[in-house]
Amino acid sequence: MNADEWREIVELRQTGESISGIATRLKVSRNTVRRALEFKAPPRDHRPRSGSSADALRPRIAAALDADPDVTVAQLHRELEWSGSRNTLASTVRRIKEERSPRTTGTRAAGTRMSSTTDIPLFSTSFVGRSEELHAIRVLLGDSRLVTVAGPGGIGKTRLAAEAATAYRRAFSDGIRFVELASLRSESLLPQTILDALRFDERDTGDRSATESLLESVRNKHLLLVLDNCEHLVSACAELISLILRNTEHVKILITSREVLSIPDEHVHVLEPLSTTDHRDPDRAGAAIELFENRASAALSGFSITDSSRDAVRRVCTQLDGIPLAIELACARLTALSVDDLADRLDDRLSLLTTGNRGGPSRHRSLHATVEWSYDLCTTQEQVLWARLSVFSEGFDLAMAESICAGTPVGPASMLDTLAGLIGKSVLQRTTSVGRVRFKMLETIRHFGASKLSDDEKSELRVAHLRWCAELVQTARLSWTGAEQEHASTRLRENRANLRSALQTALTDRNHETLHLASNLVATWFLWSSAFSVREHRMWVTEFLARDELTEDVVPKLYATLGVLQTMQGDRVEAVRTLDTATQRARELGDDATLAFALQTQGLNTYLGGDFEAGERHLSDALALYERFPGITDLMWTAHIEMGMLCSSNGQNDRAAEHFEFVHAQASATGEKWMLSYAVYGLGLVALVRGRHDEAITLAIDALALKRAFDDTVGATLVTDLLAWAEAAAGSGERAAVLLGAASSMWDSFGMQLYGSQHWVQRREVYESRARTALGDRAYSASHRRGSTLSMAELIAYALDEELSAGPEPSSYPVVGLSPRERDIAQCVAEGLTNKEVADRLVLSVRTVEGHVAHVLRKLGVARRHQVAAALATSPSCRV
């Protein structure tokens, strides 16, 4: 224990606190309390300075250091002919250097005394859901001397820092100092405020400034300094902390702030919101729901989450972005509202959540006050941009912000710097995907920003936003048959929420311009493959067709697109009516391009219904029209694919192959991948019909791999069925059953099995029967059920014989073997670190490390430290 810990124990005992009570409050063992009470005075540095077998060499080591202060341990090992451990020699060299250093000649500077309390805030509520973050802070403090816990207001920075300080205080012989800065308004008082927390003796200060006194007081300390809520004093904190780091060796600093310091020594840990699901097990409730139940039971006696209330609780936590403060404030409302009522009212969350912990800081007594605190810290430019960026849903990139939100006082030239400022103040979160950077706001922060806009400003931004979304879709359409297709698909997918928001704007405003932009956007026929699901795309098209204000030219396009979606869902009767309307309107307007699209879809719908002759006629008419419009390559290719499927079903395999090979050659030449996947699928279908089962399996797998770049559930499901049929034909009954179960489940997710086509369903039944016969009913049913539970990612991984990548889980540690902490220590020992070095890296006391090292040696069955590395390398249960 350190001196501070001893004083806390003694003071609590003097107040009448029991040994058990002290142990619980300070999170130490009762034996530690008993040992502390045996001391009559505070213990000195608890880090052992025990003798070493290399001590006999001290005079020779000292002489070698006098001759060459930079002499290495390896050189000494050879020159002194030392036969013992190099680590032991290194420890002796390090101690001699410390003793000879004028900066380490005493454990306390003259005239100082440390506080008998750490000032770490105590909380009456339990610490929930941040164990991984606590471990991350430990690792960061072990590797660096300055760690910033950053995040928006109410995210739990102070609580995490307090828990970290409490958990790691034994690693610092001179203790912990926790300094709360939220109430400090004068930068000039910062050094004195920290001095006050250190309890520096004023009579020894002389003429020194507060900064000089502070530096002198901590110069030789093994201390953790926690500075809480630095965001409004960022410049002053950055300057002072830099001075402390330059003038000390063993002081470590942990700060919490909504804005990072942006100095070279800083290591930032961005604190994320609590999740509603456990990332290691999606079926388990996440920390946000655990926190809700914990705080709700405190506010409402007997509260517990039931099966009937679980969805509402999840909805509340999701709407509140997993922000701990917001969840706690929401739970305080349960005295007057049910969970369902609370979920229904959270659209007005900033005004609803105004009651909570009246004893907490004023900025945390309402959600609005918490966000307002962040807003006040921003510059005028940052405040304006914050409000404008609220037009985005879920995310945006720099180009989007420049295109939509630029304007006085935030022009394009200053956009990047202003965005960086908002990131630094935790208003924006930065994310990366496929090497691209995007930004997002928590919904609570977005709502606040929107409240700062006038009605006219909101309207102008929404129109600009919709215009940008329309251009995004138009760009995707123009590049859909080329090498940029995959990038276009990604852009549509990552802006799905923005597209939804833009379409809702058009439906709400009923402005002629917005309706025209949005209806043309929705009429883009392939959006279901990247932006929306088939069901959602159909919903949007139906919504716009219900508007009377639509311009005539877009109506037949919408009907033709609706017909495709109905056909894919197997809604054949409705599709007939829709496509009849589309062809009639297109002919009336002389819109031959849309007419070709409608005729093509009529051909597909008719063919799937079993009328091959009429289907071929419509498809041929469409292909003839496409010859007149060379710019409509995407639809022309789909018509060839559909004609190939028809020919395959009609026994015309050579004709089918010609259509599929045509698209394959065209798509391959341009670098297109989506229609290429259908062409590869078609060739696999031909191979299956011709009895070349292995070739069919290979082609189906290739097609499925191509589908990964898109959200094409329809196509992936079609290919999965083909792969299942080919596996059954090749005699792989179990794989066929799993794949059939997966395909069946996916068809149900958007429509009828195999487009509701009877002859396609009969085709499947042939292969399904083969798999069932090979396996037996019981085994077939079990494998089929297994497949029905697979996600798309799991299905593709299974089909391609891949292992799904998974992040590290605590369960990966051996059940019988090293604990997570022992594993960390074992790795350090394997690297050759001494106990003191391990203690510094992992923020533990040397005594704690010694105990763990003894356990590691025993569990690994080795006697010496140098044997640990070999034991780890040869033990499968311990290998990284």
Image: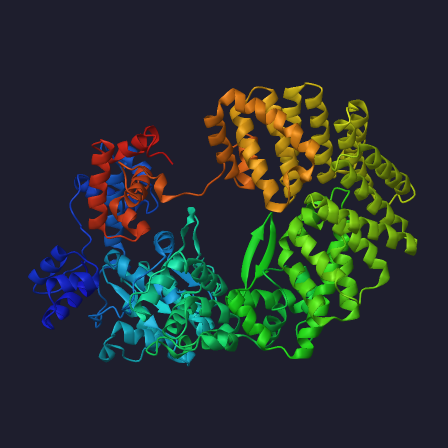
Residue 439 lies, in percent from the top left, at 58, 60
- Image quarter where the C terminus lies is top left
Could you say which is closer to the camera, residue 25 or residue 628?
628
Q: Name above or below for residue 668 compared with residue 732.
A: below
Total residue callouts = 0
Query: Relative to residue 528, is residue 830 drawn left or right?
Result: left
Quarter assignment of residue 8: bottom left
- Identify the residue shown where x is 66% and y is 78%: 455
- Residue 498 sits in which quadrant? bottom right
Task: Check the image and tell me how it is coloured.
Answer: rainbow
Task: Name the side, left or right, on which 625 lies relative to 683.
Answer: right
Residue 809's x, y, as percent?
39, 43
The quadrant holding residue 874 is: top left
Identity of the residue drawn at 78% across and 47% down: 576
Above or below — where is 141 with respect to 653?
Answer: below
Q: 782 or 166, which is in the foreground?
A: 782
Query: Which of 526/383 is in front?
Result: 526
- Percent from the top left, x then y, of residue 783? 49, 30
Q: Is residue 253 something one can see in this rendering?
A: no
Q: Position of residue 300 (x, y in %)?
A: 32, 70
Quarter occupied by the N terminus: bottom left
Is any atom of residue 70 visible in this view? Answer: yes
